[in-house]
Amino acid sequence: MNLPAITDQPKSFSERVLSWLRAITPRRWRRGVAVVPVVRLAGVIGFSTPLRPGLTLFAIARTLDKAFKQKGLKAIALVINSPGGSAVQSHLIYQRIRQMAAEKKVPVIAFVEDVAASGGYMIACAAEEIVADASSIVGSIGVVGASFGFDEAIKRLGIERRVYTAGDHKVMLDPFQPEKPEDVEKLRAIQKEIHEDFIGLVKASRGARLSGPEQNLFSGEYWTGRKALAFGLIDRIGDLRSVLRERFGEEVLTPLVAPSRGLLSRLSSASEVLGPHFGGGASAGFADDVVSAIETRALWARYGL
């Protein structure tokens, strides 16, 4: 007579109860199951209109608060897809993430989708580890400013522009006046200062992991994820699901924490777009949206996207 293997022995009553309780208990409440909230940071940083909300600290502050307050928190996953934008908003978001990570004593892992460039890369530097796809676009550690000159156009149209100021530099870089060398010099000095701050932040974040000539790393150039890995701008090639399962186990929970918009918020946005009595404000809102769309398209186009 063949005896059943030990593993085939019927479970005791207590084992069956524990197994049943585990089966009906939501994974979030099970002991040892890691929770890694996912915060998606996508779009151009700072540019905002009522119909096209930009990526700003104000826009994502509540989302970050909600993510860092999750029960069973083991880490925060940032999913980044941004070509950059406002240097100030990029730094504010970076700073808030670092502050909250220090308060909660949890690591932050950044996952790059299509692009983390310029301010998008600055935000990625808030993470202890940066993961990207081999074809992601990473880098562009620099500062850019752009404008148009309309002084010749208004002359041809016979338009006389009248500007009255108190202060010698109030109309610096006015697009309706001829460009002045001293104004450009002032702008370049400001850009240089911002660039140096950006370089310092990247060095502080990445440290000894950086490799390669600084004149290349900090020139504003960008690379694929594979090349960025060689330069130490990222830590590995991979994807969110695989990396988090490898780090925290097969049962890791990755709830997406999205910004919530209540009724008052939606009504406020609608009133901004439609304007008083659903009249004149609508055209202004539409014009702002068109300009924002053009600027946004131009930023993405820099990276072939």
Image (cartoon, helix red, strand yellow):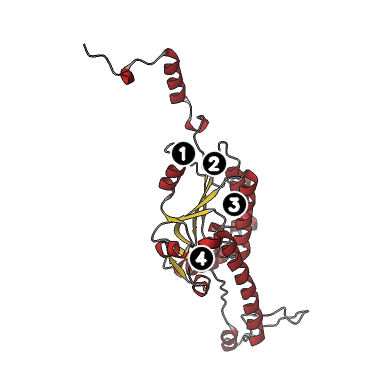
Q: Nearer the viewer, residue 124 or 119?
A: 124
Whether residue 288 is situated above or below residue 148 in the rendered picture: above
Whether residue 23 is situated above or below residue 208 in the rendered picture: above
Location of residue 75 in the rendering, given as x and y in whole percent from the top left corner: 54, 44
**Snapshot quadrant of residue 228:** bottom left
> How many C-alpha atoms fall within 10 Å of the one at disc 4: few (<14), some, or many (≥20)?
many
Residue 296 circle label: 4
| Residue pointed to by mark 3 | 60
Q: Is the Cβ of the residue at disc 2 closer than 8 Å to that at disc 1?
A: yes
Badge 2 marks a residue whose secondary structure is loop
103 left or right of 130 in image: right
Q: Which residue is drawn at 65% across and 46% down?
A: 103
Badge 3 marks a residue whose secondary structure is helix
Q: How many labels does the image show?
A: 4
Location of residue 259 in the rendering, given as x and y in whole percent from the top left corner: 56, 47
- Residue type, numbered disc 1: Val
Q: Which residue is drawn at 66% across and 80% down?
A: 186
**Snapshot quadrant of residue 282:** bottom right
- Residue type, numbered disc 2: Lys
Badge nearest the viewer, 4 or 3:
3
Q: Residue at x 57, y 77 (%)?
A: 147
| Residue pointed to by mark 2 | 74
- Residue type, numbered disc 3: Ile
Badge 1 marks a residue whose secondary structure is loop
> How many C-alpha atoms fall within 10 Å of the one at disc 1: few (<14), some, or many (≥20)?
many
Q: Nearer the viewer, residue 281 or 287?
A: 287
| Residue pointed to by mark 1 | 252
